[in-house]
Image (cartoon, rainbow, N blue to C red):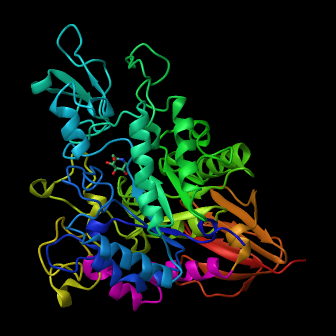
Amino acid sequence: MTSWWRRGAVYQVYPRSFADSDGDGVGDLRGLRAHLDHLTGLSVTAVWLSPVFPSPMADFGYDVSDHCDVDPLFGTLADLDDLVADCHARGIRVVLDWVPNHTSDQHPWFRASRSSREDPKRNWYVWRDGAPDGGPPNDWRSEFAAVGPAWTYDEPTGQWYLHSYTPQQPDLNWEHPEVEAAMHDTIRFWLGRGVDGLRIDALQRLAKDPLLRSNAGSDRRHDQDWETAHGRLRGIRRVVDEFPDRMVVGEVYLLDLRRVLAYLTGGDQLHLAHNFVFVHLPWDAGAFRAAIEEFEAQAEPEAWPAWFLGNHDHSRIATRYDDGGHGPARARAVALLLTALRGTPFLYQGDELGLPDAIVPPDRVVDVDGRDPERAPLPWRPPSVAGAGAGFTTGEPWLPLVADAERLCVERQAADPSSTLSLVRRLGELRAASTALQTGRQRMLDAAPDVLAWLREDGDERLLAAVNLGLGPRTLVPGEEATLLVSTDPGRPSSVVRDLVLQPDEAVLLRLHGG
Ligand code: NOJ
């Protein structure tokens, strides 16, 4: 039996923006529970929730102040248990975000650590004296450009603490065995409650040069991806393996595939890794093919691919690849691409609607790193019917909705067979019914210039997928008779074909007849 995390797509829910049940303008667990039909309609195998733990929300939940509870903004622990039970009843697994690199500065561990140099938790975080010139201990910078140095001086105890993100997110000191043990216990807490897996946040940050040397003048970074990361990850995996049939997917934000694969291979680290090389690809068939083949050549059969092109940290697919109006069609092509590639697709909420980035006026900006546009609330119903909250909330949404919520909302798209939502639902059904798509062999084809094309095969089932990334029409000749199963062009009829002319940004999936 194919493991659940290989079979179908994982759907990422950004809980603040999914559905609000209590009118405070922020999404919550009850809102999500009330909309599980939407997930079932997409045939997804699992849902990954961005953090719902208690948090002062300096980084919208990625600043955790208690790893083993739910923030009242989202509901209660009982709500989360109910959500897990409801998802399981529908055959959907639940993956939680696990943030091991840092905590909130309001976490009791950091409060204790900060209280005095003698506190037993002092070394649970990274404290250092300043440089002789009075500046920070070294040249490390926060991941967020607007934050600047990765160090903040703390007056009461006269030392600096490290934060790879905002100053409200002090880095834990993973050199300390007590930190490792305490974080392992938080994994046991959730997996013991029936949660099916974890998405590990910022995994590459878990190990730094213990000597804290500066990056300048060195041919490598000292503030991430240190060798010790792998032993730490194996320790995490051993805890996960205390529970049957669980999965860990890592955010390994490194733009060098070989470095990413070092976290995936060996069978004792990650099950899946988010490949950020892929997210940064230009709209170019050769670039996509090279990235796919590079993964195959370097990682398979040992490691299983995961493919994604959108999440809560990156401009929406429909905006990123818009290039003068191509966005909506390319978002549809990406949906087919992710469904038909060998590997686990990850779908970020709203991508099934082809949402673009929202326009966020300066007085509504809340994120320090410019990520508000891709975090806009999901439009469920037309504002003309449901009011300005578009069925997301009855209150004032925490971020503005996308401009065209009227047309892009779930209700409208569900009623339109040619919508992006209808296409994504159909793709989910096709994948759920096809072992060739789930686990079949894959071979890239030289189909036509600018056309990314590949075969998926399992037993008698042979499928051909193709995406035209060019700016003009391209002729695709499968070499044998084929049935068109789906095209991203809603105008193209399903039919038996010997060849077909793909329009720019069109993607198709064909069943080959043989011979
Ligand atoms: C990666 C998360 O996806 C991002 O949203 C967050 O700001 C950082 N890690 C820090 O936790």
Percent coordinates x, y for residue 392 in the rendering = 24, 78
Q: Is residue 198 left or right of residue 486?
A: left
User: Above or below — where is 97 with respect to 439?
Assistant: above
User: Above or below — where is 333 with respect to 227?
Assistant: below
Query: In the rendered image, which quarter is residue 78 located in?
Result: bottom left
Residue drawn at 23 percent across, 76 percent down: 20
* The one of 278 and 205 positioned closer to us in this rendering: 205
Q: Residue furthest right?
A: 515
Residue drawn at 42 percent across, 75 percent down: 84
User: Above or below — where is 426 with respect to 101?
Assistant: below
Query: In the rendered image, which quarter is residue 182 located in?
Result: top left
**Placement of the N terminus among the 4 image quadrants:** bottom right
Q: Is residue 297 visible?
A: yes
Give the residues drawn in magenta, as a range: 405-433
**Placement of the C terminus among the 4 image quadrants:** bottom right
Q: Is residue 510 magenta?
A: no
* The one of 346 and 251 positioned closer to us in this rendering: 251
Residue drawn at 19 percent across, 88 percent down: 386
Q: Main secondary structure of the magenta part?
A: helix
